[in-house]
Image (spheres, grey):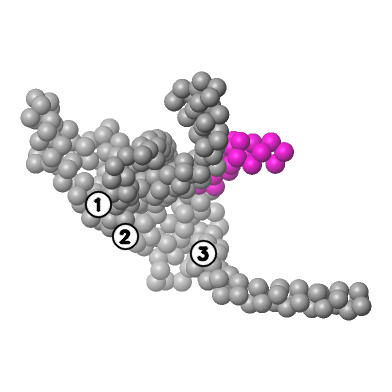
Amino acid sequence: MAKKKKQIKSKATKQESRTAMLCLLPAFLGVTLISYGPTIAVFCLSLFEWNGLSKPSYIGLKNFEKIVTKDIYFADSIQSTILYALLAVLGSILYSLCIALLLNMNIKARTIFRSIFFIPYLLPAIGVFKGWQWLYEQNFGLFNFIFRMLGLSPHKFLNSPSEVVPSLVIIAVWTSGNLIVIFLAGLQNVPTVYKEAAMIDGANTWQRFWNVTIPSIKPIIFYNVLTALITHLQVINPALALTDGGPAKKSMFMSYVIYMYAFKKNKLGYAAAYSVIFFVLVGIFTFFLFYTQKDSIFGEEE
């Protein structure tokens, strides 16, 4: 009887396994065709010289050599991308956490305020950037109009090499409504028992926030930092919609350089080599973030 039960269980397990595999197969094929396949193709294409029309010509690592030694955009694109990503991540995390803390309080019309702060994330990118372009306009923009009323000199914003990246970062921070929602969900799951115990022990608001709230939402903070970092390293929309890589190549982000070489100059092999370097750069930042936070997120033993 025991052997028969084991055989029945093993048959049932095998059948469940086959069913699971069949159900996962469409998703696996989709991910392979949409993600893994093109990624492998880019790695292979980076070893060729190809304009999209003629026959690809194998040149080995010459694309990479040319990018590192002769490309006029390489150094500026890395610098601009890293500067923008770091500022955008820091600003987005601080802004979204502060807004989430305020929205987590028992205030009137809390649901309406949550919608207001989340809406910018849902708006079409081109509409957002064109709206901010008017706000930043040097002669008739709202911000410079306010500066003139206050007796201050107007700013160039998008036309100034020193102001263009901070100006674009402000837009990124304003559209970080998704981070607010995730932070808000994490704050609502902080055990009230810990807060009450801290209050009984005489902890003030700041001490409760730093010693109870922050440790409880560390995984949420890590997730938001990770997703924001990857997202902002791949920035391209501001350069396409507002700056065209300028002024003085200060917004010549790596994703925009890849787009420019691939679709404006028809150097697909060269753009693929750029993409491989960019892939490695994003991987380095992601690995560094996981490595530095593994003890606090996953536990010391892990």
Left or right: 248 as drawn, with respect to 106: left
- Mark 3 neighbour class, 10 Å CA radius: few under 14, some 14 to 19, many 20 or more: few
For the residues labelled 1 and 2, the Cα–Cα distance comes to 25 Å
The residue carrying mark 3 is 35
Q: Tell me the kind of residue under disc 2.
A: Lys
Sequence order check: which comes first, mark 2 or mark 3?
A: 3
Q: Look at the image and give the residue range highlighted in magenta.
A: 282-302
Toward the top, the furthest residue is 202
**In front of the other: 219 or 83:** 219
Could you tell me residue 154's position as x and y percent?
Answer: 13, 31
- Single out the mark in the foreground, 1 or 2: 1
**In front of the other: 13 or 239:** 13
Circle 3 — which element? helix
* Labelled disc at residue 264: 2
Secondary structure of the magenta portion, mostly? helix
CB atoms of marks 3 and 1 within 8 Å: no
In the rendered view, tell whether residue 45 sits above or below residue 162: below
For the residues labelled 3 and 1, the Cα–Cα distance comes to 28 Å
- Residue 28 showing in the rendered view: yes
Q: Residue at x 25, y 51 (%)?
A: 128
Q: Is residue 298 magenta?
A: yes
* Labelled disc at residue 231: none
For the residues labelled 2 and 3, the Cα–Cα distance comes to 24 Å
Q: Residue at x 40, y 68 (%)?
A: 52
Quarter of the figure with residue 258: bottom left
* Labelled disc at residue 128: 1
